[in-house]
Amino acid sequence: MNIILFDNQTRTHLLPFTFTRPLAEIRIGITTIREKWERILKTQASFFTQDYLAELFPIAITNDNLFIAGNLLPNQELVNAIKMLQTGEVLKDTQNSVLALRAGSFEEFTDLENFKTIVYEPPFVAIRAKQDIFNLNHEALVNDFHELKKRRSSAVLSNSNTLIGDPKNLFIEEGATIEGAIINCETGPVFIGQNAQVMEGVCIRGPFALLEGATVKMGAKIYGATTIGPHCKVGGELNNVVMFGYSNKAHDGFLGNAVIGEWCNIGAGSDASNLKNNYDEVAQWNYATQLYENTGLQFCGLMLGDHSKCGIGSMFNTGTVVGVACNLFGSDFHRSFIPSFSMGNRTKGYIQNAIEKVLESERTMFLRRGIEMSESYCRMLLYLSRLR
């Protein structure tokens, strides 16, 4: 069967992160949702997503297609139920939301009137809000860890490090460098990816994942459940943070219960609150309703969209949401919601950041990592700049 991961109505609740990617390209745990499905189904997947993203994330259609909701995290029971679907059958939860369906054509996928409905009642995990990305990261990271270490051997941890807990809860890929660190695996597993680097003086409490080519700088303090995506650089103090990839928080400063997109940069000494002074539940901007809504969480920090950056000493209030390609600076607390392509600070105000300047700086940032920004990627950013 041909696997297609589709965006559903939860996409708008996961903005700004789904401005620049399909639902299934969200990283939670160690891998993206797409990578989880590809691993468990042993095949490649494509996407049915927004029109402006289709050039970057194309769909592949055959005469036998299995469509799966892109916000679902697989477990074996759910996978078994999906595999049993016949052409013309749709799997729905008890709230009538589509989990998966099997169709012989794209036209059938868009018209389910003649489909046979099968109701799926066992529990399953789905991401439905921005805060779910860090809130569900512990469970996802532990599951990914045990899947990824199957039939593989870990590299040896250098004697210069201190390991607390069962060595079976530590997995190091080839090419990783770890010297002079303290790693605590008693609170959860620790995964260190290929060619990643953990510098001396770093303290890590699991569950924790440091992915390919990423770096933890000297003296950093990291609490689980934290995921540092490919080619990120982090320092200072982090607690329950998910960074998607190619982003930097390389200096001192606190970040907790937060999600950081790709190609972001957080200036030295910047801090983001994750707890209100009165200990109330945190309200957060929801793009879907255009309102601040209660998250139901006491701990909820910064949500920073792709390509957004802040200067040194920046401060963010509890539950702040920042859109795509923002350029923020100044020492005052920023507004708790900042639309995409904004530039400025709370004191002097925010103006729209010119798309030409955004593309120029992002091309430079890509080239620093040895990557050339494609014209299709530029067109995607140009489209988003017009939505602001």
Image (cartoon, helix red, strand yellow):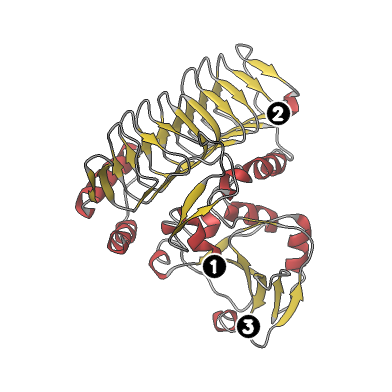
- Residue farthest toward the bottom in the current orientation of the protein: 114
- How far apart are the alpha carbons under marks 2 and 3? 45 Å
Q: Is residue 69 visible?
A: yes
Q: Which residue is mark 1?
A: 9
Viewport quadrant of the N terminus? bottom right
Disc 1 packing (10 Å; few <14; some 14–19; many ≥20): few
User: What residue is disc 3 on?
Assistant: 112
Tell me which label, 2 or 1, sits earlier in the chain. 1
Tell me: residue 313, above or below residue 322. above
Q: Which residue is denoted by mark 2 in the rendering? A: 187
Identified by mark 1, the residue type is: Gln
Q: Residue at x 57, y 48 (%)?
A: 133
Q: Are marks 3 and 1 in contact (CB under 8 Å)?
A: no
* Mark 1: secondary structure: helix
> Are discs 2 and 3 less than 8 Å apart at CB?
no
Q: Residues within 10 Å of mark 3 (few under 14, many from 20)?
A: some
Residue at (50% x, 69% y) in the render: 59
* SS category of the residue bearing label 3: loop
Give the image location of residue 28, x and y in percent: 58, 46
The spot of residue 201 in percent (x, y) is 52, 15
Give the spatial CA distance, label 2 vs label 1. Answer: 35 Å
Relative to 259, say whether 341 is above or below. Answer: below
The picture quadrant where one finds residue 56 is bottom left
| Amino acid carrying mark 2 in the image | Thr
Callout 2: few (<14), some (14-19), or many (20+) C-alpha neighbours within 10 Å? some
> In the figure, is residue 346 to the left or right of 78?
left
Between the C-alphas of marks 3 and 1, the distance is: 16 Å
Of residues 348 and 304, which is closer to you in this image?
348
Left or right: 315 with respect to 295? left
Q: Is residue 289 above or below residue 131?
A: below
Quadrant of the rendered image containing residue 210: top right
* Mark 3: amino acid: Leu
